[in-house]
Image (spheres, helix red, strand yellow):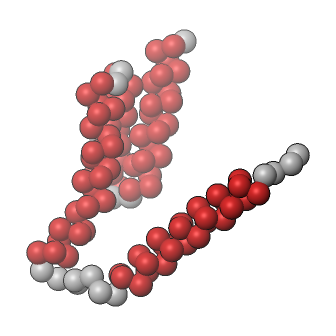
Amino acid sequence: MHTTPEAVIAILGMALVTIAVKASGLLLADRLPRDGFAAAWLRHIPGAVLAALVAPALVTGSPAEVVAAVATGGIFILTRNLFAAMAAGVATVYLVRLLIAG
């Protein structure tokens, strides 16, 4: 398999940009506010992004997505473990789609 120099340059360039973005996040983290309105706002960003990603799937998706959202919410309320809730949601979508298709 032969790789062109342009492809190698593109891959190296993307790697450098990725490293720069991650390093800048680490360098800027110390400058973020730890209390007050801005800190509270920053703490809510991950949940808002996740909701923005999930909402279209709930509105336009099949019943499997709705059942999975309810299961995910229920598991999170019971365990307060985000990873367990997300795993339950993925497994629920898979199982409900399997049941509907089969």
Left or right: where 80 falls relative to 17: left
Residue 62 in the image: above or below residue 34: above
| Residue in view at x 41 percent, y 84 percent | 27
Query: Closest to the observer: 19 or 102?
Result: 19
Look at the image and tell me whether residue 70 can be seen.
no
Specify whether 11 is left or right of 88: right
Furthest toward the bottom, the residue is 30
Viewer-closest of 16 and 58: 16
Residue 57 sits in quarter: top left
Report the residue that reaches farthest toward the left: 37
Q: Is residue 4 visible?
A: yes
Q: Residue at 41%, 76% (x, y): give it.
A: 25
Residue sitting at 88 percent across and 46 percent down? 1
- Compared across the picture, whether 89 is left or right of 19 comes to left
- Which residue is at 59% across, 70% downward? 16
Quadrant of residue 61 in the image? top left
Note whether 73 is above or below 21 in the view shown: above
Image coordinates of residue 29 in percent, x first then y, are: 35, 81
Q: How many marks?
A: 0
Residue 73 position in % (x across, y down) = 29, 44
Q: In the image, residue 42 lies at what x, y percent?
A: 23, 69
Q: Nearer the viewer, residue 7 or 35?
A: 7
* 88 to 33, vertically: above or below: above
Q: Quadrant of the C terminus?
A: top right
In percent of width and height, residue 55 lies at 27, 37
Q: Residue lying furthest right in this view?
A: 1
Residue 66: quadrant of the picture: top left
